[in-house]
Amino acid sequence: MSTMANDFSATRRLILKGAGVLTLIGLGIVPLDVTKVLAAANDKYPEEAFKAKSEADAIKALYGKTPEPSDKVKMDAPEIAENGAVVPISVTTTLADVTSISFLVSENPVALVASYKIPAGTLPNVANRIKMARTSNVVVVVEAGGKLYGVSKEVKVTVGGCGG
Amino acid sequence: MKLRSAIYLASAALALAALTLASTLPSGAADKVDPAADAKAFRKFFTDKFPKVKLEDFVNGPYSMNEDLYRQWQEKEQFPPYEFSLEMGKEMFSKPFKNGKTYADCFPNGGIGIRQNYPYFDEKEGKVITLELALNRCREANGEPPYSYVKDEMAALTAYMAFTSRGKPMDIKIPNDPRALEAYEKGKEYFYTRRGQLNFSCATCHVQSPGERIRAEILAPALGIVNAMPIYRSEWSGMGTTSRRFTTCNSQIRAVPLSPQDDEYRNVEYYLSYVSNGLPISGPGARP
Amino acid sequence: MASTIRVRATSSGETTEVQALIQHPMDSGFVKDSKGEIIPPHFIQQLIFEHDGKNVFTADWGGGVSKDPYVKFAFKGAKKGDELKISWIDNKGATDTTTAKIQ
């Protein structure tokens, strides 16, 4: 019983601590060492890109340019998603100097799903599970050597990932 | 080869038709209940219908029926979504009740590696006892309130108990007791009886149409379907028990579900588990 | 429940493969509950993996990432026994951190 109680209060402390950080950000005075999560400036969360409705606006907000097609980016996605709530998508690329990989779903209410920063020494391969509201193109954008590349694949969704 | 499998199929279909017919006859008309022969015919029906599916793979439900789905499942199993529930179940299982006893005190072998023996027929009580029922009875006997049968804690506990039994063949016994045979027979009757606005029986979907889509979903074969319980369903965004599966199946065919652990559900689980004897326990499972 | 984060980090000599599963509702803010009311957005925004004081992977997430999110990646420069630090922060400011040993 007592361990339960401890767990709960620990969680609460975490949340309270987090809330404090958020308030500081709001005031624009967050010191760099407040939490490791928000450590480096280039790790800033791309708030605007995650507000964009369309895929084009999201890509522009993230990278400030448009991607060109590439046969060096391979996306692995199902033909028909078993359930739109959990669609496994993975990407590998043979492009050199990859710095970022982003996943977008054209028909989702917010197109950008995830954006990964790839520092030197990390391989340009990412797998994740995403939600899809309906049948849509899934777009993967890879930033490599300062240029932007994109691939797109349609995934059919018969059970949407935004229902109950 | 083709002709041969066609003959098998036809004979299996005939056998099934005979089964269905038998179960719709008024009780007493079918003079002899033979569960062992039932189970053999049941298994043969599925292995004939799906000659490419390995026997032990039937427990993987819709994933055994469709390659694209199978790949998505393989990916999910790398870090399965039931992981948190399983871990919660493990913690709960070892945590003592207020009186100092634990779940282990209620079960043979401390509850480890015994999932394949549930449900069993209790000759003292004259009824079928499922694992979920036994868990709640264990709680009540130790002064703890029972859990909801459909998800959360009950799913976590059964997930852990299934996990410790993975790979063990389902091993349901029908004791030499006319009441046990009757429970089995009633379960079978429930399974093949049509109900609800859609007028479907359990068998309509899970015997006649596994591998096919009903609306958007691919139907699981009845053979081994209970071996994977409890399951994390993406559609539920969470875990569900055998009770949850039965009640939601009934709702989906627009029938009024019974209460979880109603005698009839216990009998269906008894029937369905018995005819899945020999197939491995694979729970907890992940489903679309 | 000790941590919301489950990690498997396995080294195959040169590269370390990392898989993480995190317990989080990842509510997008576009889904209604059974009463027809919108479930407010509640999702992890940033997930960071650090090895030897250096970021090896940063995930920026929106509400379109699945519930109990999963991610897999691989990096070079670590060896068996090294520690990997994982932390996340969500849109409500909640955080969690854990450390895993590379196997």
Image (tube, rainbow, N blue to C red):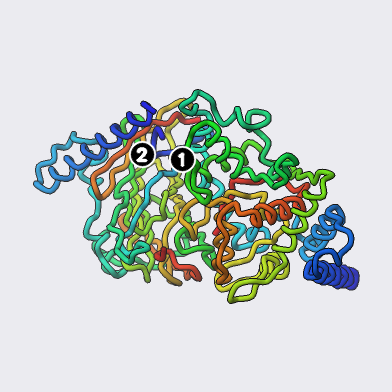
From the viewer's perspective, tell me whether residue B151 is left or right of residue C2.
right
The amino acid beneath tag 1 is Val
Position of the N terminus of chain B by quadrant: bottom right
Measuring 9% from the left and 42% from the top, which residue is drawn there? A29
User: Where residue B105 sits in the image (x, y, percent)?
Assistant: 60, 27
Q: Evaluate if marks 2 and 1 touch, with contact meaning CB atoms under 8 Å apart.
A: yes
Q: Nearer the viewer, residue B176 or C38?
A: B176
Q: CA distance from mark 2 to mark 1?
A: 9 Å
**Residue corresponding to mark 2:** C49
**Subunit of label 2:** C
**Subunit of label 1:** C
Give SS at disc 1.
strand
User: Where residue B279 sits in the image (x, y, percent)?
Assistant: 75, 48
Measuring 89% from the left and 71% from the top, which residue is drawn there? B7
User: Where residue A80 sits in the image (x, y, percent)?
Assistant: 54, 67
Within the image, what quadrant is residue B60 found in? bottom right
Q: Nearer the viewer, residue B88 or A151?
A: B88
**Residue corresponding to mark 1:** C18
From the viewer's perspective, tell me whether residue C98 is left or right of residue B154.
left
User: Where residue A13 sits in the image (x, y, percent)?
Assistant: 24, 34
